[in-house]
Amino acid sequence: MAAVDTAAMTVTSLHIALISETFPPEINGVANTLGRLCQGLQQRGHRLQLIRPRQAGDLQQQSDDNLLLTRGWPLPGYAGLQWGQSSLHKLLRRWRRNRPDVLYVATEGPLGLSAIRAARRLGIPVVSGFHTNFQQYSGHYGLGLLTRLLTHYLRWFHNRTRTTLVPSASQRLELQRRGFQRLELLARGVDSQLFHPARRSAELRSSWGLGEQDIAVLHVGRLAPEKNLALLQRSFRVLQASYPQQRLRLVLVGDGPQRAQLQSALPDALFCGLQRGESLAAHYASGDLFLFPSLSETFGNVVLEALASGLAVVAYDQAAAAQHIRHGHNGALAMPGDEQAFIEAAQWLLEDRETLRRVRLNARQHAGKQGWAAIVEQFEGHLLQARLA
């Protein structure tokens, strides 16, 4: 399918139903992306109806015409999140009374499946989003036998929708090879005013025990098995041994099931927990080198946030890193799975201060141009196209 040309369409106000297991203020890449997309659509005059499971913080929240809270179950491995239960009859009643023009289904659980079934009965077009590699996660949680079954289910699920939006070219290629159909690219943006080098804080760095000439090696993300954090540990140890004259400190921002294990393995590292908004932006900007060893990302919003904050990023050549990092210019890349190359890329960035300074400047220059406005317009175009098909 050709790229969406919104200029050639008559853009009318749409009534869009969005179905997701997660949404702000929850902290994860999917929630962040959906929050940005919804905010942008509302600013462009569209009406949104949100369907999601009731979370712990929703005890006083009531459903209304623009919000439907469903029952859910705790999601294993994701403390605080709920897995939405099937709500077919509830959705049928709501949408017969208040019919949306198009659905966007962001998660593939029972709630998302019931939304697709209801939409098929009512003739409502559906666009889906592939936000999370659940089929890869299963192996990290001792459920390796489910990987093939999950892949079959996800393919069946997404192939029942008009279009599936994927965040990166590498993800689209992988899914095409696995038989997913009607895939379109919808990248991610970054708030380059929030994530900005100007938020660098000498006071925060001092609390980390670092002066201006010292190196803060930063990682931001969920502390979980699928993030390949054993490589983060090894990389930092090699950097310490390679540059004994340089004061280095490993700083981890985020939380998750591996936190206690990591704290035991890395007693000298700083664990800052979950951070939001300007505090998160200050943590990014106060770092120097960003290590991102994950191999399971569909995109990796943190890569763009780190680049926008003026950090030198080391990552595998896939997802967001493949789209936004030119090796040796605004970051450093390794072929996926090549751990030695990943470590050597980090070493290269610390060999020379001028190299590190140049890469960080180029990182900010590139990411500063990757705003959300164009992404929202593309998303709008895909929804309009589904509506008019």
Image: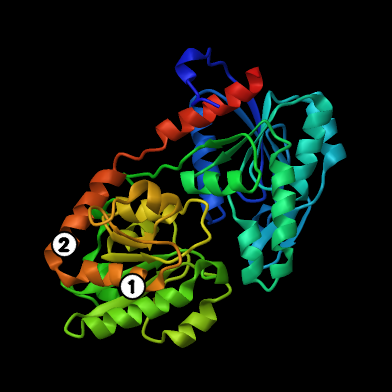
Q: Callout 2: helix, strand or loop?
A: helix
Q: Nearer the viewer, mark 1 or mark 2?
A: 1
Left or right relative to 310: residue 181: right
Residue 115 lies, with reference to residue 177, above or below; the image says: above
Which residue is situated farthest in the right direction here? 89
Residue on which disc 2 sits: 355
Residue 226 lies, with reference to residue 301, above or below; the image says: below
Residue 130 visible somewhere in the drawing: no
Q: Nearer the viewer, residue 31 or 382?
A: 382
- At label 2, counting other C-alpha atoms closer than 10 Å, the crowd grade (few under 14, some 14-19, many 20 or more) is some
Quadrant holding the C terminus:
top right
The kind of residue tagged 1 is: Ile
- Location of residue 205 in the rendering, given as x and y in whole percent from the top left corner: 26, 70
Q: Nearer the viewer, residue 152 or 78?
A: 152
Q: Nearer the viewer, residue 300 or 174?
A: 174
- What is the CA distance from the residue labelled 1 to the residue labelled 2? 17 Å
Which residue shows up at 65% across the image and 21% down it?
Answer: 387
Left or right relative to 161: residue 13: left
Which residue shows up at 69% across the image and 69% down it?
Answer: 144
Q: Callout 1: helix, strand or loop?
A: helix
Which residue shows up at 23% across the image and 72% down it?
Answer: 215
The kind of residue tagged 2 is: Thr
Residue on which disc 1 sits: 343
Residue 126 lies, with reference to residue 349, above or below; the image says: above
- Location of residue 141 in the rendering, given as x and y in whole percent from the top left corner: 65, 71
Nearest to N terminus: mark 1 or mark 2: 1
